[in-house]
Every structure is written in structure tokens, then in C-alpha cells.
């Protein structure tokens, strides 16, 4: 259930159980126990909007998962059963009791000795102090606090810290205004029928802007209203990416020797899989079209046939190289974006098209000083790593200009923006999620 993402949580309990029973053994067969466990540990929810053991370790203990002791590790394991109920700051006694249960189970299973378990049980439950409030609670200030804890650990509680961030106030204000106005427009039917969330709540969205040359985040808008919902949809939400994966698929194809104008199949013949035939729905009627046109018009069948032809592992390798840390399963459905990732991951990944193929790490903090001006932490100048050939990055960028001018992203033009732009849309089944990641020059 954790690996499947939000789409599985939205179906009924009986159907969910059936899907889990069917897909669980298949995942183990295709990926192996170690890979499934690694993916699970990187995706499991552990309270306070935290997904994955590394992020939880830094939040609760101010250190990475590799530095945790036995008792701390047991507490994190205990959180998986009831993240909010065993939250150690709000419920320290309950968290300690749950930690001790896990330690005794580890000893019973022979994974640790009785002596090791008893020593950890005797130790007090120590967690890092809660991060201090920044002036004005916003999505970006909460994100800064999360990053601050990651870079300086538990020292964030000391008074007088001065945090130099990458946020551009002008871009931030523009991002907040754009998200608010566009969600309102969609809700009232400006682009078709009026839309609302399945539960009747107002639509939600997010926006992030970063400098593709450095990864410095210039704007961070995690939702409509932080006071109504602190859940950050820039970083904490993971949704199916849909057709956003297709530019990465084209990169993999060009790396394998394809030309951008080479014909690719969009045949209606199903692709053979272990469970029979599979073929995604498609709005494109042609059965053969140039690779560039397949990207511009976002052909699902072309993506599926092309990806199977060049190899699923090649597509995943490109995704990982450009900074997608969420798992990309080696399944044909991944070729049309049936895997979850965050908006921050996908925006960072698209930076390679704006900087000539160099990987960047999205970040919010440049420097941290104490009240006396002593530098406690400063970001090291990054040694950029080329992950995509410059010619390939430019070729895909140029194709994505056509996405905006005459492809699936023409709403950018119809909304009044006439400047240079490139990008890619992404939608998931039944329009549950809609994405756009774009690039513009300075």
C-alpha cells in the first residue's frame, strides 16, 4: 500500500486488499526483497508530514539514519504502526513503551542479544528539540526549517540564528498569486467544467520555481493556505507523474542512438507482459510518428513501445541521474508515469534541460550564522556533474518548446504568456492530478 501511493488509498478496502494480494508477490519477484524493502523504507509515513526513515531520523534525532543507535532505530520502527499516536514529543511515554516492545521483539527473533535489548530499554528516550518558529508561518518557512535541521542538526533551537535563504520575494509573491488565481479559475470552470476535489473540498495545488543553473529555490508555494493545511505539496506530496516522464524517456532514446526525427511505433498491438498484454490509452490516432512529434503530442502508445524497446532500466537510470529519488519501478506502466514523485523532484529533474545537462540539488539555504555573525554552516560551491549530453539536453528542450506552442501545453499561450517557454504537461487517470513543469529564460 505504501509503495503504490495515493491512488491505492482512494479505492475501497476490499478492492485494495485484492490489489495488494496480487501486486505484492509480483513486486518481490520482479524487484527482489532488498529493493522492495529499500523502497518501502524511503516511502513509509512516520508522522509530522515525514516520509522515509532518513527524513524522520533527522527530524526526531537531528542525525542521519546511519548514526542512529539501537533504541532510536527501534523507536522509528515503532512509529510505523501508529505515527501520530507514538509521536515522541507529544506522547513520550507511549513512544518509549512502543520502542521497548520493538526491542524485545528484536531480541526474541535473535536479531539482537538480550543484553543489547535491555541496555537500550534502560536508556532514556531522547529526541532533538522542536525546531523554532520562524516569523510568519508559511510553506516556505516550514520548508526552510526542515532543511535547517538537516544541515545543522539539533542546533536549530539556539536563539538568534540568521538564515540566508535563496527565496526571491518578488518571485515568491508572484507564485502565490498565480496559484491562488489559477485554482480559483479552474474551480469556477474557466478551462472547462468546474472542478472540485472528490470530497467536495476546494482544489489544491502547489508551485515551485528554481534556478536551473544552481538548484536555488526562488519560490515555494505548498498549497492554497498554510493556516488551513500545513501539508506541503511541493515536497511532502507524492503523486503519479503521468506524462512528465516522457522527456526523460526521450533522453534515454537519444542516448541509445535514436534521432529526434526517427519514426517510432504507436501501434495498437498490446505489449507482452508476464500477466498478458498491456497497452495504455492514447488520444493520438497515428500508429507511427516521429519521436519529436510523439513527445509534443504526448503519445502514450509511442512512449510504451519506445520504452520497452530501449529498456526500462535505461529510462530509470536517466530518472535517477537527474535527481528523482523516488522509486521508478521496472514496469511498463512507468513509461507513462505510473509512479509517484514530488513536485520538487520533478522540477529539479527538468533543470537539466535548462542548464545543458548538469544535475543540480534543489535547496533553500545558502548560509547559517549565529547571533554574532559566526558562520555555523555554508553551502559548498557545488561541483556540477554532467548527466546528460549537452546536445541531447538542448534537443529535448527544443522539442518541449513545441509542447507549449502547439502541443499539450498550449494553455500557456492562451492564458496570455507570449515569451520563450518550454515544458511538459502530465495528467493521471481521470484527471486526478494535473502537472506542468516549464522553463523560461532569464
Image (cartoon, rainbow, N blue to C red):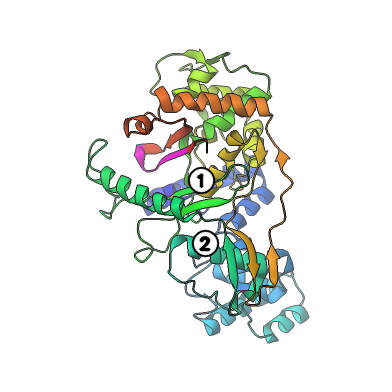
Q: Residue at x 45, y 17 (%)?
A: 268
For the point 36% across and 47% down, the residue is: 178
Residue 151, picture quadrant: bottom right
How many residues crowd around disc 2 within 10 Å: few (fewer than 14), some, or many (20 or more)? some
Q: Closer to the camera, 325 or 409? A: 409
Instruction: Please indicate whether residue 68 sits to the left or right of residue 174 in the image.
Output: right
| x then y, percent, for residue 310 | 64, 24
Judge whether 427 appears above or below 206 on screen.
above
Magenta span contains residue 394: no
Secondary structure at badge 1 equals strand
Sequence-wise, which precedes: disc 2 or disc 1?
2
User: Which element type, helix, strand or loop, lies under badge 2?
Assistant: helix
Could you tell me residue 82's position as x and y percent? 49, 70
Q: Is residue 271 above or below residue 68?
A: above
Residue named by callout 1: 340
Whether residue 434 appears in magenta in the rendering, the answer is: yes
Q: Is residue 432 above or below residue 81?
A: above
Span colored in magenta: 430-437
- Mark 1 is surrounded, within 10 Å at the Cα level, by few (under 14), some (14 to 19) or many (20 or more) other residues, namely many
Left or right: 374 as drawn, with respect to 292: right
Viewer-nearest residue: 354 or 99: 354
Q: Is residue 407 visible?
A: no
Which residue carries the number 2 mark?
A: 143
253 and 417: which is toward the camera:
417
Report the mark closest to the observer, 2 or 1: 2
Amino acid at each position: 500500500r505504501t509503495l503504490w501511493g495515493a491512488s491505492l488509498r482512494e479505492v475501497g478496502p476490499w478492492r485494495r486488499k485484492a490489489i495488494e494480494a496480487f501486486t505484492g508477490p509480483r513486486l518481490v519477484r520482479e524487484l527482489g526483497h532488498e529493493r522492495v524493502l529499500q523502497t518501502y523504507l524511503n516511502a513509509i509515513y512516520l508522522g509530522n508530514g515525514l516520509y522515509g526513515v532518513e527524513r524522520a531520523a533527522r527530524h526526531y534525532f537531528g542525525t542521519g539514519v546511519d548514526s542512529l543507535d539501537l533504541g532510536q532505530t527501534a523507536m522509528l520502527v515503532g512509529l510505523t504502526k501508529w505515527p501520530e499516536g507514538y509521536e515522541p514529543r507529544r506522547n513520550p511515554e507511549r513512544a518509549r513503551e512502543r520502542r521497548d516492545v520493538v526491542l524485545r521483539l528484536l531480541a526474541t527473533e535473535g536479531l539482537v542479544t538480550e543484553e543489547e535489548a535491555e541496555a537500550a530499554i534502560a536508556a532514556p528516550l531522547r529526541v532533538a528539540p522542536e525546531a523554532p518558529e520562524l516569523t510568519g508561518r508559511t510553506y516556505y518557512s516550514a520548508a526552510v526549517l526542515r532543511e535547517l535541521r538537516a544541515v545543522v542538526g539539533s542546533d536549530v533551537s539556539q536563539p538568534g540564528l540568521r538564515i540566508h535563504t535563496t527565496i526571491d520575494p518578488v518571485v515568491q509573491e508572484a507564485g502565490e498569486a498565480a496559484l491562488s488565481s489559477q485554482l480559483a479559475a479552474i474551480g469556477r470552470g474557466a478551462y472547462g467544467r468546474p472542478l472540485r476535489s472528490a470530497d467536495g473540498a476546494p482544489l489544491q495545488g502547489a508551485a515551485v520555481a528554481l534556478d536551473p543553473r544552481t538548484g536555488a529555490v526562488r519560490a515555494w508555494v505548498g498549497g492554497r493556505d498554510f493556516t488551513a493545511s500545513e501539508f506541503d505539496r511541493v515536497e511532502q506530496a507524492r503523486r503519479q507523474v503521468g506524462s512528465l516522464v516522457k522527456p526523460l524517456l526521450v533522453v534515454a532514446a537519444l542516448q541509445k542512438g535514436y534521432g529526434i526525427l526517427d519514426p517510432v511505433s504507436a501501434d495498437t498491438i498490446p505489449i507482452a507482459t508476464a500477466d498478458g498484454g498491456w497497452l495504455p490509452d492514447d488520444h493520438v490516432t497515428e500508429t507511427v510518428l516521429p519521436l519529436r512529434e510523439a513527445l509534443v503530442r504526448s503519445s502514450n502508445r509511442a512512449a510504451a513501445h519506445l520504452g520497452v524497446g530501449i529498456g526500462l532500466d535505461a529510462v530509470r537510470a536517466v530518472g535517477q541521474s537527474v535527481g528523482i529519488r523516488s522509486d521508478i519501478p521496472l514496469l511498463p506502466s512507468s513509461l507513462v508515469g505510473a509512479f509517484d514523485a514530488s513536485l520538487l523532484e520533478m522540477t529539479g529533474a527538468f533543470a537539466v534541460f535548462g542548464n545543458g545537462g548538469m544535475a543540480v540539488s534543489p535547496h533553500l539555504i545558502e548560509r547559517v550564522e549565529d547571533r554574532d555573525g559566526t558562520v555555523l554552516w555554508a553551502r559548498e560551491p557545488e561541483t556540477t556533474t554532467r548527466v546528460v549530453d549537452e546536445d541531447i539536453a538542448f534537443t529535448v528542450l527544443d522539442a518541449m518548446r513545441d509542447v507549449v506552442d502547439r502541443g499539450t501545453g498550449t494553455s500557456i499561450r492562451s492564458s496570455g504568456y507570449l515569451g520563450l517557454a518550454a515544458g511538459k504537461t502530465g495528467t493521471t487517470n481521470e484527471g486526478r492530478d494535473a502537472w506542468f513543469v516549464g522553463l523560461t529564460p532569464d
